[in-house]
Image: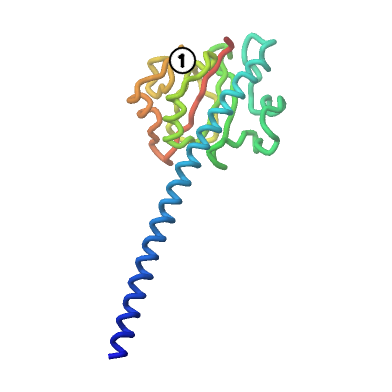
Amino acid sequence: MQSMKKQSQQGATLIETSLWLIILGIVVAAAIVLFVVVSGKMQITKAQEEIITVVPAIIQQFTPQSNFDGLTPDAVNSSGLFTQEQFNAGFFTSPFGSTSQIGFYAVPSTNSTAGAMVISFVPEAACLALSAMSWPDSIIGMDTVKTPAAPTAPSTVITDGDGNLLYGTGHATQSVANQTLGCTPTADGAVNLNIYFVKK
């Protein structure tokens, strides 16, 4: 009788331990999900702040010129807009992690009157969030390149007919369908985001 009671207590203890482990697992999983969500929002906010800060500074830097000839990552680095630690192998590290980089370019097909800030490997959620924000008049558009790679200079400035247009000329936000289409990656779970700006 004593042995059966002892076995019953051991069984109850095992069940309680299992329940506690299940509860602990749920709590840990919820904490991880919460951390990922908060971290993602912080990255988006940081990217927004960088765009709003850096674009006007570049425009001011190139005020003496009629265009953005000479706009390169090296030129931006020499102006001290980013910390030296952020500049690596000719690009700047973006808020989206070590594989995501930022490049700056004059857009050649417009007589270099437009500049571009190109962020590589932007997660889909961040791409959608950035394309839905309100931006200053100097930012005339955004589009995407579907195959993530190191940032490269766009060959043309986007137009309203661009299939990957996220944020149109005249700073008119595009439809959710356009933004979703533009931000949906074909591989690697990310896109390259091109942000175009002009002197206003």
Task: Report the quarter where the N terminus lies.
Answer: bottom left
Q: Is residue 5 above or below residue 84?
A: below
Name the spot of residue 82 as percent of width and height, x first: 67, 31
- Secondary structure of the residue carrying tag 1 is loop
- Nearest the eye: 89 or 196: 196
Task: Tell me if 119 is positioned left or right of 191 in this view.
Answer: right
Task: Report the quarter where the C terminus lies.
Answer: top right
Mark 1 is surrounded, within 10 Å at the Cα level, by few (under 14), some (14 to 19) or many (20 or more) other residues, namely some
Task: Tell me if 45 is positioned left or right of 146 in this view.
Answer: right
Name the spot of residue 178 as percent of width and height, x first: 35, 24
- Nearest the eye: 99 or 14: 14
The residue under the point 44% across, 46% down is 34
What amino acid does circle 1 point to? His
Residue position marked by numbered label 1 in the rendering? 171
Task: Tell me if 157 is positioned left or right of 3 in this view.
Answer: right
Q: Is residue 193 above or below residue 8?
A: above
The residue under the point 47% across, 20% down is 134
Name the spot of residue 9 as percent of width and height, x first: 33, 80
Q: Is residue 181 above or below residue 57?
A: below
How are the colours assigned in the image?
Answer: rainbow
Name the spot of residue 124 as percent of width and height, x first: 42, 35
The residue under the point 68% across, 17% down is 61
The residue under the point 69% across, 10% down is 64
